[in-house]
């Protein structure tokens, strides 16, 4: 009778070990599958980080170019502001005269004195009426 109990205990122990072994094998397979999934996800994330870094570097270069252009423009603007303001007014007045502006327009828009505007209008009429200059045009 003790022998039967012994065989029964060994059989139950063997079945328990087999069930435990089966369960451990399934768990191992599941863990391997999860590891593959995590590695694939990790590769996707690495690629996205590379692309983001690449885009950020390109944007940084572009921003640096824009900043350089802005600095050049600011320097040119400063140069223009430091120029003789009267020269700019006379250039603008000459252009307005070419477009048919009168003395009042020159005084109002260019900020030059009335006698200067009248002199410019007189010169413009003389140049416009000169036959030598008409043949050059």
Image: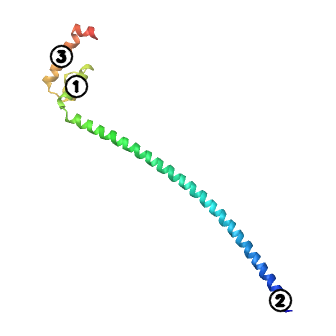
The relative height of residue 127 versus residue 25 in the rendered view (above or below) is above
Q: Position of residue 84 (x, y in %)?
A: 17, 31
- Answer few, some or many: residues within 10 Å of disc 2's Cα (few below 14, many 20 plus, some between 14 and 19): few
Left or right side of 101 for 32: right
- Answer few, some or many: residues within 10 Å of disc 1's Cα (few below 14, many 20 plus, some between 14 and 19): few
SS assignment at label 1: helix
- Pick the residue in front: 35 or 83: 35
Q: Residue at x 21, y 13 (%)?
A: 127
Quick check: marks 3 and 2 in contact, CB under 8 Å? no
Quick check: marks 1 and 2 in contact, CB under 8 Å? no
Q: Quadrant of residue 6?
A: bottom right
Q: Which residue is mark 3?
A: 123
Q: Which residue is mark 1?
A: 91
The relative height of residue 69 versus residue 137 in the rendered view (above or below) is below
Q: Nearer the viewer, mark 3 or mark 2?
A: 2
Name the N-terminal-most of marks 3 and 2.
2
Residue 14: mark: none
SS assignment at label 2: helix
SS assignment at label 3: helix
Name the N-terminal-most of marks 3 and 1.
1
Q: Quadrant of residue 45?
A: bottom right
Name the N-terminal-most of marks 1 and 2.
2
- Gap between marks 3 and 1, in whole Å? 14 Å
- Gap between marks 3 and 2, in whole Å? 133 Å
Residue 5: mark: 2
Q: Position of residue 1 (x, y in %)?
A: 86, 92
- Gap between marks 1 and 2, in whole Å? 119 Å
Q: Nearer the viewer, mark 1 or mark 2?
A: 2
């Amino acid at each position: 009778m003790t022998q039967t109990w012994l065989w029964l205990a060994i059989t139950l122990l063997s079945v328990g070990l087999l069930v435990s072994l089966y369960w451990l094998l399934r768990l191992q397979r599941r863990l391997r599958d999860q590891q593959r999934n995590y590695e694939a996800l990790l590769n996707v994330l690495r690629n996205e980080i590379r692309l983001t870094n690449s885009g950020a570097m390109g944007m940084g270069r572009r921003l640096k170019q824009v900043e350089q252009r802005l600095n050049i423009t600011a320097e040119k603007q400063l140069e223009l502001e430091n120029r003789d303001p009267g020269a700019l007014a006379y250039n603008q007045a000459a252009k307005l005269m070419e477009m048919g502006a009168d003395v009042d327009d020159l005084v109002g828009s260019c900020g030059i004195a009335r006698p200067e505007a009248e002199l410019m209008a007189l010169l413009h009429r003389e140049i416009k009426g000169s036959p030598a200059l008409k043949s050059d045009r």
